[in-house]
Image (cartoon, rainbow, N blue to C red):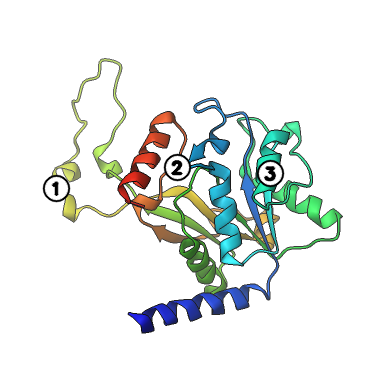
């Protein structure tokens, strides 16, 4: 066991040493206008604001030259700074709405740093609503990107239920034709489906700013377990996260 621990520690050190050859920017997007769960990005989970969970993980990896919180709210910015993150400016109103793209926010943020003479080779988007990603998850997914020279690595998890058991319903809610032939097979014989879990997005600068390539199409998957893939968007999600912590499930 001791040998295994030493091996893991050396592997982490090697990953960080290799990462230092690249300039990395961690971006934690934390706008204030959540409607489903008001102020969700600063809700205290186990006594710590949600956005702080992502800040701490980013620092613990040692992969980043800068850990930046992107927010449109000065109160959020103050909380982020208390945990050591940089918030040198607030996000403009045009990038603070429900329809704002995370990629637009990432590009705008990187451009602001570049205007000030600070350049990065890659960025990692760490959403505050994914508090259970671990330092290992971030490091291992980055190593996957670095080792294979992938332009992007994005975290996924296995779906809770196969989409093959799903179908839209007509207005009268008839189940006629709802179950297809493949739906009646044993669960073990169906293919495994995965979904984006929102926890980690490692994207090279070249890919982020390439208008001819879709970020998702050019990226590769890092698989995380369901227990670390909670994405807090509703009150029920938040209570589930608290339960996971209480029961030691994450």
Question: Would you say 250 lies left or right of 93 here?
Answer: left
Percent position of residue 175, x then y: 19, 25
Q: In terms of sequence position, does the residue under pointer 2 or pointer 1 come before the other?
A: 1
Depth check: 220 or 123 in front?
123
Which residue lies under the disc numbered 2? 231
Between the C-alphas of marks 3 and 1, the distance is 47 Å
Percent position of residue 9, x then y: 48, 77
Residue depicted at x 35% and y 56%: 225
Between the C-alphas of marks 2 and 1, the distance is 30 Å
Between the C-alphas of marks 3 and 2, the distance is 18 Å
Quick one: SS at disc 2? loop
Residue depicted at x 46% and y 43%: 46
Percent position of residue 69, x then y: 67, 47
Residue depicted at x 56% and y 65%: 61
Q: Residue furthest right?
A: 116
Which residue lies under the disc numbered 3? 70
Which residue lies under the disc numbered 1? 185
Residue 107 sits above or below residue 62 on the image: above
Q: Taking the image as drawn, is residue 73 in sight?
A: no
Residue depicted at x 30% and y 16%: 171
């Amino acid at each position: 066991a001791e040998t295994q621990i030493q091996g893991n520690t050396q592997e982490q050190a090697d990953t960080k040493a290799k990462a230092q050859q690249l300039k990395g920017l961690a971006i934690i997007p934390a706008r204030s206008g959540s409607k489903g769960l008001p102020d969700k990005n600063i809700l205290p989970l186990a006594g710590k604001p949600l956005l702080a969970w992502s800040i701490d993980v980013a620092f613990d990896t040692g992969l980043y030259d800068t850990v930046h919180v992107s927010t449109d709210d000065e109160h959020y910015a103050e909380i982020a700074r208390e945990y050591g993150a940089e918030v040198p400016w607030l996000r403009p109103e045009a990038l603070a709405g429900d329809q704002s793209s995370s990629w637009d926010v990432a590009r705008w943020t990187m451009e602001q740093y570049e205007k000030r003479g600070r350049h990065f080779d890659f960025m990692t988007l760490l959403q505050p609503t994914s508090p259970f990603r671990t330092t290992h998850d971030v490091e291992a997914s980055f190593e996957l990107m670095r080792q294979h020279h992938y332009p992007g690595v994005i975290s996924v998890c296995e779906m809770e239920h196969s989409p093959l058991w799903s179908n839209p319903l007509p207005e009268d809610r008839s189940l006629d034709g709802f179950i297809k032939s493949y739906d009646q097979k044993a669960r073990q014989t169906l293919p495994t489906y995965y979904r984006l879990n929102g926890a980690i997005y490692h994207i090279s600068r070249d890919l982020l700013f390439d208008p001819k390539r879709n970020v998702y199409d050019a990226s590769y998957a890092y698989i995380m377990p369901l227990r670390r893939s909670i994405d807090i968007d509703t009150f029920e999600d938040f209570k589930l996260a608290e339960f996971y912590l209480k029961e030691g499930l994450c």
